[in-house]
Every structure is written in structure tokens, then in C-alpha cells.
Image (cartoon, coloured by chain):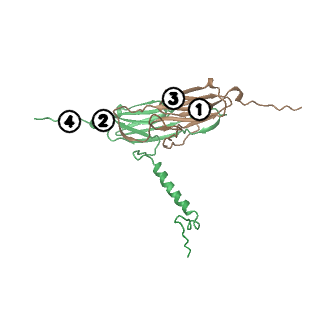
Amino acid sequence: MTDTESKALQAKDKTEAVTPAEQTRPGLVFTPAVDIFETEKEITLLADMPGVKGEDLVIDLHENVLTLDGSVKPPEGPNEADVFREFRTGKYYRQFTLSEIIDQGEIKAGLQDGVLRLKLPKVKAATPRRITVQTQ
Amino acid sequence: MLLLRRPNYWPAAGWREPFEELERMKRQMDLMSARLFRAPSDEAAAGVFPMMNVTEDGDNYYVRAELPGMKADELAITATGNSISISGERKLAVEDEKAQYHRREREGGKFNRIVSLPTQIETEKVTARCTDGILTVTLPKAEAAKPKRITVNFS
């Protein structure tokens, strides 16, 4: 089942990212599109990063700041000349501040077909607990 | 006699039309930002999903598109004469129904695009593969369209 039955996809330019510090390596930096949702136990993040291989992706969580950093090798071969070009390739970079306390040891990340799926489990203390009010 | 000299920048007229100066500044800012953020002119975007890059070498054309998360069976590619059509549907799986969304930026939906290539292609030998969310279609040029080296004979 999908929630996107008949909608037609619109062409969109990739959003270029504004990084806090300048890059040492020249090249374009893009903001990956993400879905973030939360259940009682965990926060899941999905990010579209086409062209990023597992070994080129760095995920870092430091003092509640989550950083995604994926570099892309140009897919073109050395002898290819452009006919026309509509999208550009470059690295992907994005940071999020997490308000919940994450169990760092239990973070799971998977990258498949250019989509990153990151599971950030909340620590036990942060999972909501139903509080019953006692009446006398 | 007392000469009252008023400096040129004295905003005597400005008081009557207090927003005139602001309007002028706004126009200038708009002009500047339009120059700064103008899209690079070498990109000929057709405005149809997916965005494509087409390259060539001596033997083949290569058509590339970024389609993260798409499986091979969700894509239909057909090649005819000198054009290639790519259609499909990007499906975003429904996650846990109880999940509360913080952000929802990824998009799903149907698409259908046709691209014409400068020369005829060998439709029988077209291959396509998807790696890391990038679709690459390799289209061999027809024998007649390939560049030929012509040797000059000196007599």
C-alpha cells in the first residue's frame, strides 16, 4: 500500500546546502530530502542520497547534533562528453538537532538504493510512561 | 543676510513620500538577488521528472537519472529509433501508522519522460542498470551514426 496513488512527480532542482564552514574540497553540496518520524520507542530518519555508497557515508551524533555527510563519486566515465545536463552531483550534507535522548549504542543505519534509513532508539528514560493519578 | 544652506542629502522630499526610498531600495535588492541566485545558464532543464544527464562517447549514449529507492520492477524503459522513454512510479512505503511525522520532504508519484537523442540508436542492445539510486541507461549508437576515421591517401 502506498499513500501516493496517482500523483504525478514534479521535476525539482536539488537544493544546495549552506554549510557552516567552507569545504576544503571544491564541489557542490546538496541538502538531501528527508522524512523523519517518531514512534514511542524510536525516531526513524529516511534520506534520499542517490549515488552515495555505504563506505562514503559518515553519520555522526555528537552532543545531540546529528550530522549526515555523504560524498558522491561522479558516475560519468572518463571519456564521456556532455550532451545535456539537468542535474548536478556533489556531496550531501545535513545536520539536525535532536531533542530526545538517543541510545547511541543502538543506532542502526542501512543504505539501500541511495536511501538511508537511520533508526535512533530513544533511551528508556525518554520513552513516555503513562502516569496514573491516584485518588484517595 | 542669513544664508540657510541645506545639505543635498536632506530628505526634504522624502518626508512627503516616506515609502519612496524604501521602494527604491527594495527594487535594487530584488535586482541584486536575481543576479546572485540565477540558475546556471548552461542547464537546459525540461522541467519533467526525472532530471536527466545525457553524455556520449564514441560508441554509446549514457542517460542518467537520480531515482533513489526505486526497484527495477517499478521502472519501464522503452527505446525506439532515436528516443528513449522512462516511466514508473516511485512508491513510498507507509510506515508505522502510529508514527508522528516531524518532516516529510521525500515525494512519491508517477512519472513518464521521453528523451530524444541526436542520432539513431541500436534499440536491441540498450542496457539499463540501477546502482545506489542512480539509473544508467547505455544506448549504443547505430553503426551509421558512429564517427568514422577517414584515412587520406597520398598518391
Question: A55 or B140: which is nearer to us?
Answer: A55
Q: Which chain can be seen in brown?
A: A
Which amino acid lies under the numbered mark 1 shown in the image of this protein? Leu
Instruction: Locate residue B123, reporting x and y percent.
Output: 35, 34
Residue on which the image places disc 4:
B150
Which amino acid lies under the numbered mark 2 shown in the image of this protein? Ala
Front position among marks 4 and 2:
4
Residue on which the image places disc 1:
A66
User: In whole angstroms, how far apart are the C-alphas of marks 4 and 1?
Assistant: 59 Å
Question: B63 or A67: which is nearer to us?
Answer: A67
Q: Are marks 4 and 1 in contact (CB under 8 Å)?
A: no
Q: Are marks 3 and 1 in contact (CB under 8 Å)?
A: no
Residue on which the image places disc 3:
A57
Chain under numbered label 1: A
Residue most extreme to the front: B1
Residue on which the image places disc 2:
B142
Q: Is the residue at mark 3 from the same chain as the one at mark 1?
A: yes
User: In whole angstroms, how far apart are the C-alphas of marks 3 and 2?
Assistant: 39 Å
Classed neighbour count for the residue bearing mark 2: other residues with Cα under 10 Å, few (<14), some (14–19), many (≥20): some
User: In whole angstroms, how far apart are the C-alphas of marks 4 and 3?
Assistant: 48 Å
Horizontally, is B150 left or right of B126 in the view? left
Q: Colour of chain B?
A: green
User: In whole angstroms, how far apart are the C-alphas of marks 2 and 1?
Assistant: 50 Å
Front position among marks 3 and 2:
3
Instruction: Locate residue A39, reporting x and y percent.
Output: 66, 32
Question: A83 or B91: which is nearer to us?
Answer: A83
Q: Are marks 4 and 3 in contact (CB under 8 Å)?
A: no
Residue most extreme to the right: A136
Q: Is the residue at mark 4 from the same chain as the one at mark 3?
A: no
Mark closer to the chain start, 3 or 1: 3
